[in-house]
Amino acid sequence: MLKKLVMTVGLAALLSAPAMAAEEAEANCAALLKQVDAALEQSQLDDAGKAKAQEMKAKAEEQMKAGDEDGCKATASEILDAMKG
């Protein structure tokens, strides 16, 4: 019985690891998107610049929803870099 319990707990931990990693990855992208929002609020961009940043942010959000963490991070980082320079 103890062996069965240990195996069940082990299997549950093994199966939940990818889900936990996905949540962590989403949080990282979500944190970058929050930085983009804050930067947009404080930016001195003209209307065209803000529209472009919003368009890229929408792309990053779609990437996040699709599970493309690397793409989302890259797009969000690109926005932040462009707003710095």
Image: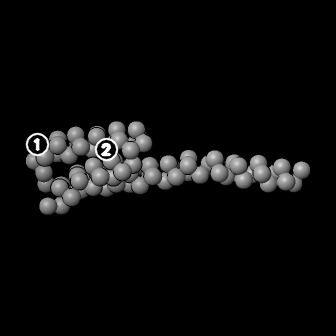
Identified at 31% across, 44% down, the residue is 60
**Residue 57's image quarter?**
top left
* Most foreground residue, 50 or 8: 8
Q: Is residue 38 visible?
A: no
Residue ID at (79%, 54%): 6
- Residue type marked 1: Ala
Give the SS element for disc 2: helix
- Find residue 18 and name its label: none
Residue type at mark 2 is Ala
Residue at image coords 65%, 51%: 14
Camera-nearest residue between 28 and 51: 28
Pointer 2 residue: 60
Q: In this image, 46 relative to 15: left or right?
A: left
Q: Residue 51 location in percent, x, y?
A: 17, 41
| Foreground disc of the pair 2, 1 | 2
Secondary-structure class at tag 1:
helix
Q: Which residue is mark 1?
A: 48
Labels 2 and 1: the sequence-earlier one: 1
